[in-house]
Image (cartoon, rainbow, N blue to C red):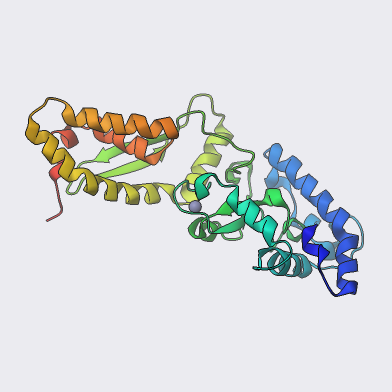
Amino acid sequence: MACIGKIKDSELKGKFEKAAASIESAACRFEQSAEQRSVHLLQSKDFKPEQGGLGVTLEITSQDLAKGLYEQRMAKIGSPGRLIYDRIKLAAPNGICPLCGVRQVATLDHYLPRATFAALSVTPLNLIPACFDCNRFKLDGQPGTEGEQTLHPYFDQITATRWLQCEVVEGAPPIVRFWVDEPRAWNPVLTERVRHHFNLFRLGELYAHHAMTEISTIRWLLRELKATGISDAIKTLLKDHATSAFKDDLNSWKGAMFEALASSDWYCAGGFEAQAT
Ligand SMILES: [Zn+2]
């Protein structure tokens, strides 16, 4: 408990030290539930010291944990726990938010909110690197059902199978639409969870927005290719872009987008030129 180490107020330090074992035990309960995908069954009262939720009578309050310990002694720049805070942030590969897979990590998100699960305020497995937008979309919500558990990047790995699909919507300009297409191997709960995660973090909207920029950027290149008159040159280029993106990530929005563009005869035959008047 690095956050407690440098507290100068000896009375407050003593209170946190007394609570340390209970906080660690709460962290174990959370870890077991997350492993079993049953976080929705945890009761917030069991994580609030003033309600006796930590098993023993403690002198600290939820406020002490959520604000005093997390905000002041872990998240605050220069605080004793900030090193751990930064380490967790840096754990995200390439600094990309694991919740959306697109934006940069800017903060830590509490998987279960510290406002209602105070004892998990500084639990590393409850702290997920996130971008500001994902952190904002999630708010302080708690999953009410098994299917409402958002994907936890440490416990839920769904990168081995393809689940993101995309299609071209013909028009001026051409746009694309993304959706979750569950693999056969998934059980209904996992499908519900991925759809919930996709909708809560507005991933369809995010990917479509980025795709518009990409579609605009490649317009000139496709026009040049069309002018060469080489049959299927456009489709081949788009397919190669998709293959390259999928090598990196099977559910890359770019991969899904290029694949959809390549398979649209309308787009490849000249639809890419369509622009809003
Ligand atoms: Zn994000």
Q: Position of residue 56 (x, y in %)?
A: 92, 58
Residue 123 located left or right of residue 264: right
Residue 158: name its quadrant: top right
| Residue drawn at the location 76% of the way across and 65% of the way down | 65
Residue 268 visible in image: yes
Q: Observer-nearest residue: 182 or 272?
A: 272
| Residue drawn at the location 63% of the way across and 57% of the way down | 86
Residue 208 located left or right of residue 238: right
Quadrant including the N terminus? bottom right
Q: Position of residue 206 (x, y in %)?
A: 39, 51
The tally of labels here is 0
Q: Position of residue 228 (x, y in %)?
A: 8, 32
Residue 67 located left or right of residue 137: right
| Residue drawn at the location 64% of the way across and 68% of the way down | 77
Q: Residue furthest bottom?
A: 9
Q: Observer-nearest residue: 76 or 207?
A: 76
Residue 3 to residue 254: above or below = below
Residue 21 to residue 251: above or below = below
Residue 60 located left or right of residue 277: right
Residue 258 to residue 136: above or below = above
